[in-house]
Amino acid sequence: MKKVFNTLSALLLIQVAAYAQQPANRTSATKIADVLAQQPAEEINKFTAAMKELQNFTAEDVANLLAGLKPQGGNNAATEYAANSYSFYVMQPGMEAQREVFSKGLLLALDRLQDKDNKGFVLQLMRQASKNEAIDALIPYLKDEYLVDKAAMALNGIRTPEAAQALSNALASSASEKTTIAIVGALGDLRSKTDEEAIIATLAKYTSENYQRNAYTALSKIAGTKSAPVFLAKLKEVNYQFDKTNIGGLTLDYANNLLDEGQQKQAVSIANVIAKEAAKAEAPTLQVGALILLTKANPAKARKQLMKAAVSNNPLYRAAALDLLAENGTDADTKKLIGTLRKSSPEVQESILNYLADEGTEALVPDIKKSWSSLKYTRAKIAGLNTLSKLSSDGSTDYLISELPDADETTTQAIEALLLSSKDPEVVEKINNTIAGANTKTQLALLKVLATRTNANSSKVVLPLLTVSDNNVKIAALKALPNVVDTEDVDALVGVLANTSESDARYVQEALVIALKARSDKDAKINQLAVETSRNPSPTSAKLFPVFAGVGGEESLKTVEGFLKNNELKNSAILALANWSNPEALPVLIELSRSERVNEHFGAIFNGLIKQINASDHTNEQKTLLLKDAFELAENATQKRTVLSSLQATGTYQALMFAAKYMDDKDLKGAATNTALNIATDSYDFIGTDVRNILNKAMENLTGSESSYLREAIVRHLTEMPTGEGYLSIFNGTDLTGWKGLVENPIKRAAMSPKELEQKQAAADKKMHDNWKAINGELVFSGEGDNIATVKQYGDFEMLVDWKLDPNGKEPDAGVYLRGTPQVQIWDISRTNVGAEVGSGGLYNNQKDPSKPLKVADNPLGEWNTFKIRMVGEKVWVWLNGELVVDNVTLENYWDRNQSIFPVEQIELQAHGSQVWYRDIYVKELARKETYTLSEEEKKEGFEMLFDGNDLDKWTETPAYEITPQGYIRANPDAKFGKNLYTKNEYSDFVYRFEFKLTPGANNGVGIRTPLEGDAAYAGTEIQILDNDAEIYKNLKEYQYHGSAYGIIPAKREGMKPIGEWNEQEIRVQGDKIKVTLNGVVILDGDLAEASKNGTLDGKKHPGLSKKSGHIGFLGHGSEVFFRNIRVKKL
Amino acid sequence: MKEKNTSRRDFIKKSLIGAAAFTIVPRHVLGGKGFLAPSDHLTKGIIGVGAMGRGHFKYAGTKTVAICDVDTRHLALAQKALGGGVTEHHDFRELIQNPEVDIVHIATPPHWHGIMAVEASRSGKDIWCEKPMTRTIGEGKKVKEAVAQHGNIFRLNTWFRFDANFYGMNVPVKKIKKLVDTGMLGWPLKVTISKHTGFDWKFYWVGKEDLPIEQAPKELDYEMWLGPAPHKPYSTHRVHTTFRGYWDYDGGGLGDMGQHYLDPVQYFLGKDEESPVTIEVDAPQQHSDAVGTWRKITYTYADGCQIVLDGAGTEEGLAYIEGPKGKLYKGFVSDIPDMERKLAQYPDPAPQMTDFVEACRTRQKFALNEQNGYYSATLVNLGLAALRLNRTLKFDSDKQVFVDDEAANRLIDQPMRGPWII
């Protein structure tokens, strides 16, 4: 259980001293192992529990935890998770005491760790969680060339005057550029005023650009008054140009920081120098910075300069000035800017107008309009229109429209955009009112607006334009139509449609669909159109087909389908069906895809088919069947790829396996790989060898820039995939390997002698080969002969199988026998004389339990169907084409109705009187819940079953342990501590037998003669259960090995099976004698009294040794362990 | 310097600084395609020409004249892709100083973005920066200040707020913004970014613990690659295509895809000058070095709007946007009857400046710039902080600091390794 480690490690002396003060029994090493075993925590409650446990750590414990760090690349993750998270955790309000303890531990660790990168990790933790208490310890590292950066970062994180002082002191004695850079950088971040002169002094010492940039940055942040001449001299030296020391920008930063600290005079003086010299040196970047600073320092004084800059021909400078004016200018300034428009350059005009759009008011609109004639430049004009639109409460809509007749193309587009986004609520109404009487150019522009922005009256003005002579206007009106159409326009549009050219018809059709859909009497109106169309078919009738396709509905579909028989209109009908707006046309598209393979429109049919399969509300299993059918019809690689891609969304195992078949096909491998890998990685239900092979293959196939990421994702998925097998194919598609002929029934077979059975089997196998064949990857039954059976026997399982009946067969019928017993029914549902109308999938031969399926989910006769069958114990579930048709129903034993179904038997496919096809047969075996019973010998000896897999009636209640579906007791790692599982009864001398299975690093224990409360290892005695080969337990003492009487008598480290396998153990206790046998190996055989007479090995008191009787328990501790088949005998 | 507001929800009262809505007629309106004659081409220099940087060659309107990388293999690949003849630099500062270069593209891992953007800003050049804008909130503030101080034009390299159909929505974000602005969905809104709403958080970008120490290849200047990041021994998985899995350089899938997904949401929620006030996480414990996965991150703004990043994707049937009056699902499907026809009655959102070259010429802010980009990068960085700390964080949107959480606040300004400093 908890006490894994003892103190006799390298840190013995220090630790002993520390432990002496601990109230708890737990040792440092134990606490550490406990915390590490929980890293990383998946859920928040577990995370919090681990953090809480760390709160019990002393500084020594923290240091010991970090002492476990191995050189980089070693197995450090658990320690890193724990320490890093805790460093954040202790920074929360109210946790100062814990933080201090943690920080002290970090100091100890920093001192003791030898590896530089491990020290570096501790410095990172200090950066995150340390405060002043850490400063002294950090100072020496400021001289360490390798660690100086991290030490400086840690002081930077501490960010107190004391940290700055430490850096100051270090600067004085810093001997190299490297250490000086780190120290100066941190001093800059800490704004350490006292170091200004010392840093200035270093500028002469270290002249590299790197150093200079770093030091000037620090000085700019510190913003002391002595730096000013240094900055200005350097700036002059580079002639106000940009250089690698960044001196220009840093001087501005410096001056701004001076200003922020109230050194206005000095800041302004620097800015003035920069403003003047940068202008001379043509460095607008610096001019901008200086102007901003001067404005900030004294807006009133800077205004004149701003106004001048606002009309500067340098766009950078001008833009900055206008930005500043926006906040600091007056109304008079704004007016003055309008006044400059006339004599400004076009670029300046544009800038000013854009400025006015943001900063002007409606009162300025007349002035702006007055200067209109001076705007010659298109971009300036557009800016002006934008401004007018923005500033006027009516959006200047009329003005914008009135500009259209004379506008060039660019301006026209700009006006359209302005009308579209105009906030004028009347904008559409104004357009409606203008359009009829406007010239062509205006009409074209306004129709373009109406194609996006409209109101209820727009259709009335657009409709008449559909018949004007100007073709451009007509087309613009057509394009606007879908957006403006009104529900009342249907009849008019039907008329228009008849007279519209093929190429323009789509706009009218689109508008009709929208109008019809919005009508409350939609169905009646469609009926009316349908009747008219069907009654008087004409070549123009076809123009309505896309309308029916767009609106959809039963009547529409019936109408268009009707025209499939009309030779002249058939292809139009086909195209409409292929483009049908919802999946209701799927059945007819399936038919067409088979019947019209030579049609010139097969491509359209195929695309429509796939689209509708994808959009349908069929189950994923049904979609998979339909897509597999479509794949057979595909004419080219593009169509096949479409199918393979569509399979992805079904997420079915069958789709995965289907796609995987094409991962080597040169034309299809991309789509196949993509689908297979996405299905496989989206589900952890799909496991086992086949899935692993597919994913490995996918990794080989991946190319392109994202492939390294995808490969990482696959590797991760494979690592996390549960072990064990999933679905296995039991039909290889080419022969009958794994199958055998049927001999009688299970009861009769059991009664046969081996020889008799062998003979009969040989005969049956011969017959099987006559009647069952592997043809084209399908398992085909001829219609004569007996069932085919799996060689293997199955207990609990899930099975997938596709099947198809013969539409021409006599009484089509088949079935799947589960555990040698009839049957999951398959039949032609039209055979009402035998009751087949209930559908396939039912447990047909049941008499007491339901024999009928819950619903009919069969596909039409002759089409493929798919079953998923689950059988657990005597219960059966069946899904037919993805629909649950049998839900948790007992399968009765047909061969002997007095007994339950056989626990294991073969699976059979039924022979009936007609041909049947099967394919894609997969079986996944399910772990079975086993109920254990005492052996005859144990019964005789007087053993009692304590846990047989079903209930914990003989045990105390605790949420820390649960029964798994397989019938094991599982120690739940998410449970809190101290909730052990005890027998209700007490035992004194006894033999205790059980099986257990470990997970990596697992830790548990058997308590003997324990009370229900207290620490069982001391208040009773604990027989250790432990994965003692795990890395985190590497420093184990021998009396902590698995099987030891914890702290008292060591066990031999022998006999344990590999992790994940079941072990058998027996603990025999009689008086003081104790014997532990693991998988037949005696690993402990000793005397508790003898072993403890001179004190126990762990030096602790074990009052439990004097107990003569007590409970037996499992002493859980946050790790996952499984137990089963638990027996006890009192001696 | 005032913050220009390009996306204000003008029907929602806000108590922010009083700048009027800033609107620009889009570039395509002004000149149409092919507006620039070849001789007018602005030039660009690209820092970082790994897979991401080489993607920058194709961005329209500018011509690549210089490239920079600390791995000579990248330079060779880039030269080959460009047909040769492009100036090569090893030190990004030389590229920034190169007088041939008008615009500096930053396509390095994020731990370099802040330094390089500030450096380019101080040089007076315009900047095109990869997402996420910066790796820390503090570096983002510094970029914002530098660009303001020097008058540069800055664009962040994600485009969904103004261009292209937005992942699973099949429509441009403009249309989503229009819908939100109409108020048809009501207010406040909850936006869920999940594989069921069209945005799959695939966790390709996780790091590894216990990386082996390896010899850095001779072609790579590893010290310069690390730059401001703390020194750690070289391991192949740290660098190049897999660096996103380490906190020192980025933040996993949230770092890589976060700003793509979050920036448009910030835009249509009208949160371009505001940060959320709480950030909640549901995630496994994170490692000190390697970025892990997460299940859910929830951002809540002061007005109740929420952005939920559903990493686990366990909840199906969620709306992309959920409001008290209506919902919008993947593919721009809504439960509001006749939504499209209703939408046609409303004005379009204000046009945005979407042509970078035009923005540079006229010195107008680009649609996605250092200011709104700062806020969407901050969304990413807030999420990353909450993940690393594994607890709910409270944030003061005005002061841009965490409330009562010194550990989180220490992540805002993370010190750099000398000689790098920002």
Image (cartoon, rainbow, N blue to C red):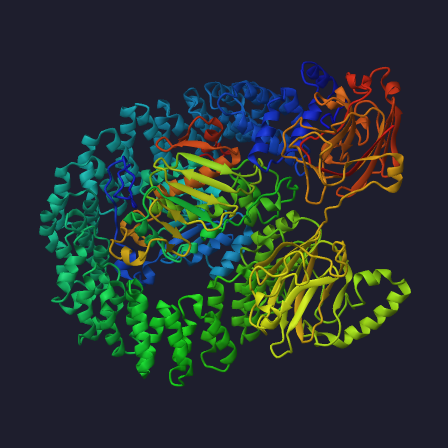
Left or right: where A360 falls relative to A594 = left
Quarter occupied by residue A839: bottom right
> Which is more toward the observer, B73 or B129?
B129
The picture places residue A1100, in percent across and down from the top left corner, at 77, 17
> Which is more toward the observer, A812 or A130?
A812
Quarter occupied by residue B208: top right
Quarter occupied by residue B4: top left
Image vertical order of residue A624 relative to residue A540, above or below: above
The picture places residue A508, in percent across and down from the top left corner, at 28, 71
The answer to whether residue A673 is visible is yes
Looking at the rendering, in which quadrant would you find the N terminus of chain B? top left
> Which is more toward the observer, A731 or A396?
A731
Question: Which residue is pictured at 52% across the width and 41% down the height?
Answer: B249
The answer to whether residue A244 is visible is no
> Which is more toward the observer, B54 or A148?
B54
Give the farthest residue toward the bottom.
Answer: A567
Question: Which residue is pictured at 52% across the width and 33% down the height?
Answer: B389
Left or right: where B285 falls relative to A256 = right
The picture places residue A741, in percent across and down from the top left corner, at 79, 69
Looking at the rendering, in which quadrant would you find the C terminus of chain B? top left
Image vertical order of residue A51 relative to residue A373, above or below: above
Please tell me how many numbered marks the rendered image carries: 0
The picture places residue B199, in percent across and down from the top left corner, at 46, 51
